[in-house]
Image: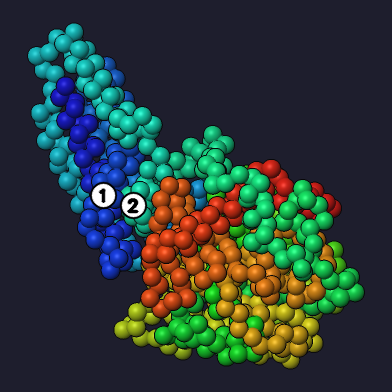
């Protein structure tokens, strides 16, 4: 029974690490204006259940080795086992540290990234060191202190642990009893307690707030659960609960998205597969260039009322453009946003084309594939190394033929920032030269890089904001990427292709550290359409999301081509509607309202057009309507994906 002491020693040190992790997470990301201890403490107690469950899963091999007869009785064996456990503790702490940094960019804990983003591991390490040097030093000191304390306690335990004077039979009995005690405790910890069903991720969604849900979780647990779900092929497990019948979802969901007076659905089996009622001769063969700006947040753009206008060129250009005042990113990660923009499918439930088992075998008619049928050249331009963030796989599936990356731009003099890739100015000017050479019409996505952490600038002259300004490092690179845009447009305006091009500039997602827990700020990104020869300057105030860009562009081109989309043209008369992904939570926007709800709980809802942003449910009727409409939309989404009725399998399909 004395080995129970070793069991408790290991468990205590791991739990202490998780506790410190939760405290840092709380301090780093909480908006204490909206939180109080009466909510924080239950979340932390629930977090203890997840931490105990995590400890059971990751320590069970060491606990089994602890009770191997004969070998485990030897002092040398016990010391070696404790040293191995210490190494494991160090690795877990490093992983938790990475998870803390990752949350700022993705608004969720680590899950499948070890599988899908392993190519970026060098850049991630560089970013962590350059941007968070004080925190890395703190981690180092913490690991040193923890190791010293662990070894000191271990020596004390081993001195007390001895089988001297025990007979062989008594040793076996003692080991067996201790093993059974540890086995029972491990089983209870792993399943999360005595309740009927084992602990699951949904058990963290009981606090009426996405942040508190994330506070209760830890990155090790979410990663283990994700790998287990992937192994069991249960990616769609969360879709079993229904909000309404399929018929209700079809009728009402389709009504929210499609404009019958402007669009036609040729086949009722595919309710979102449709075309605009333009004639074939109405088509305007314009080039399409989409600038996807890394981490651009509306709160820092003057055209959206930002206190700090870190994008003066964008704000000037917006006066000559179609400006979307309430534009939302569909996700919190670049790969989610790029997928949503090109496929017109929201990333709910992990629906990212290059990473979703559900979408990988599904017919999808993307905007590039539609334009390729009209002899358009298609490009994806990104200054990072080849394959970064999984874009190479995504581009193959979306029908984009030419993928231009770091090495291509470097060969023409592009300057490397030393971490991620080429500075935006050089990437954008490379794109201008590329477009100038094209004899055919073209479609291009240009994904910026410089406004990504660790916020590298090409020279000191771009260091506009001083340290006393909050988030000054991000604001400086934001202003630099805006400058890079101005350089592109200065050059492009001299070229022949300029007047025959629609330019779209939008953010991929918001900058996670500064948007904190405000749902509107967390998803609100700038977006404009600029084509002075073809579009009149105007301001559109209804809700528009990245998923709406495909139908909006086809509408501007007056295309009669059939397409499938969960979005609608921004120029339709219907209220704007969209489904946004916030970790494991779906956020629904419609007609000036934003609703975040988990499977069982209302989490947050308010009218983002009102300065007070009054929280529901003082308007119960509106709350009920929003939940009902969200149910229609999400069930239509689920049904079309599950039944493979999003798009027919035509020659235009990419897989």
Q: Please provide percent x and percent y for residue 302.
A: 49, 86
Q: Residue at x 30, y 65 (%)?
A: 34
Checking the image for residue 56, the label placed there is none
**Residue toward you, 84 or 210:** 210
The kind of secondary structure element at disc 1 is helix
Checking the image for residue 207, the label placed there is 2
The chosen color scheme is: rainbow
**Residue toward you, 77 or 127:** 127
Query: Is residue 58 something that shows in the picture?
Result: no
Q: Residue furthest right?
A: 281
Q: Residue at x 16, y 21 (%)?
A: 1
Q: Residue at x 30, y 33 (%)?
A: 193
Position of 324 compared to 80: left or right? Answer: right
Contact between marks 1 and 2 (CB within 8 A): the answer is yes
Position of 445 compared to 375: left or right? Answer: left
Position of 530 compared to 606: left or right? Answer: right
Q: Residue at x 58, y 74 (%)?
A: 542
Checking the image for residue 42, the label placed there is 1
Depicted 360 relative to depicted 308: above or below:
above
Q: Please provide percent x and percent y for residue 431.
A: 69, 77
Q: How far separated are the C-alphas under marks 1 and 2? A: 8 Å
Q: Residue furthest front?
A: 621
Depicted 266 relative to depicted 325: above or below:
above
Q: Please provide percent x and percent y for residue 317.
A: 61, 88
Query: Is residue 650 something that shows in the picture?
Result: yes
Upstream in sequence: badge 1 or badge 2: 1
Q: Please provide percent x and percent y for residue 645.
A: 72, 47
């Amino acid at each position: 029974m004395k080995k129970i002491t070793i069991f408790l020693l290991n468990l205590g040190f791991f739990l202490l690490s998780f506790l410190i992790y939760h405290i840092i997470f709380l301090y780093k990301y909480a908006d204490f204006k909206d939180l109080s201890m009466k909510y924080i403490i239950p979340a932390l107690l629930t977090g203890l259940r997840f931490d105990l469950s995590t400890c059971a899963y990751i320590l069970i091999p060491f606990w089994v080795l602890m009770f191997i007869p004969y070998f485990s009785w030897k002092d040398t064996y016990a010391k070696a086992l404790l040293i191995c456990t210490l190494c494991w503790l160090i690795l877990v702490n490093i992983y938790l540290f990475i998870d803390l940094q990752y949350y700022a960019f993705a608004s969720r804990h680590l899950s499948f990234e070890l599988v899908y983003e392993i190519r970026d591991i060098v850049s991630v390490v560089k970013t962590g060191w350059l941007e968070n040097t004080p925190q890395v030093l703190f981690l180092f000191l913490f690991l040193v202190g923890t190791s010293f304390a662990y070894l000191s306690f271990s020596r004390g335990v081993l001195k007390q642990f001895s089988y001297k004077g025990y007979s062989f039979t008594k040793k076996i009995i003692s080991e067996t009893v201790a093993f059974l005690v540890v086995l029972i405790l491990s089983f209870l910890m792993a399943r999360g307690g005595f309740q009927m069903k084992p602990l699951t991720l949904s058990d963290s969604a009981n606090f009426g707030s996405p942040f508190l849900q994330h506070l209760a979780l830890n990155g090790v647990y979410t990663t283990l659960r994700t790998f287990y779900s992937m192994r069991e092929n249960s990616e769609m497990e969360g879709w079993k609960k229904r909000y309404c019948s399929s018929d209700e979802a079809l009728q009402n969901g389709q009504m929210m998205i499609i404009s019958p007076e402007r669009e036609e659905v040729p086949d009722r089996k595919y309710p979102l597969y449709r075309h605009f009622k333009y004639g074939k001769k109405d088509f305007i063969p314009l080039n399409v260039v989409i600038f996807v700006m890394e981490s651009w947040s509306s709160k820092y753009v003057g055209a959206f009322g930002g206190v700090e206008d870190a994008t003066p060129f964008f704000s000037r250009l917006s006066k000559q453009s179609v400006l979307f005042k309430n534009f939302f990113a569909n996700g919190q990660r670049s790969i989610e946003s790029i997928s949503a923009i090109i496929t017109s499918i929201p990333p709910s439930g992990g629906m990212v084309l290059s990473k979703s088992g559900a979408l990988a075998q599904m017919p999808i008619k993307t905007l590039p594939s539609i334009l390729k049928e009209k002899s358009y050249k298609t490009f994806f331009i990104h200054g990072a190394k080849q394959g970064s963030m999984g874009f190479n796989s995504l581009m193959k599936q979306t029908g984009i033929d030419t993928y231009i990356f770091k090495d291509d731009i470097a060969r023409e003099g592009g300057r490397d920032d030393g971490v991620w890739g080429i500075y935006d100015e050089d990437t954008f000017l490379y794109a201008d030269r590329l477009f100038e050479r094209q004899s055919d019409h073209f479609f291009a996505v240009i994904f910026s890089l410089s406004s990504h952490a660790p916020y590298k600038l090409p020279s000191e002259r771009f260091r506009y904001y001083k340290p006393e300004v909050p988030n000054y490092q991000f604001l400086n690179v934001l202003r630099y990427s805006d400058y890079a845009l101005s350089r592109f447009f200065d050059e492009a305006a001299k070229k022949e292709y300029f007047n025959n091009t629609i330019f779209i500039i939008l953010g991929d997602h918001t900058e996670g550290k500064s948007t904190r827990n405000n749902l509107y700020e967390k998803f609100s990104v700038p977006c404009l359409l600029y084509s002075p020869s073809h579009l009149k300057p105007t301001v559109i105030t209804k809700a528009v999301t990245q998923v709406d860009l495909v139908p909006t562009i086809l509408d501007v081109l007056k295309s009669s081509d059939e397409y499938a989309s969960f979005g609608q043209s921004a120029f339709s008369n219907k209220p704007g509607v969209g489904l946004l992904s916030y970790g494991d939570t779906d956020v629904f926007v419609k007609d000036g309202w934003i609703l975040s709800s988990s499977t069982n709980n209302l989490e947050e809802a308010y009218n983002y057009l009102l300065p007070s942003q009054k929280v529901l449910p003082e308007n119960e009727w509106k709350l009920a309507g929003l939940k009902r409409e969200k149910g229609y939309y999400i069930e239509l989404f689920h049904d079309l994906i599950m039944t493979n009725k999003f798009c027919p399998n035509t020659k235009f399909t990419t897989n």
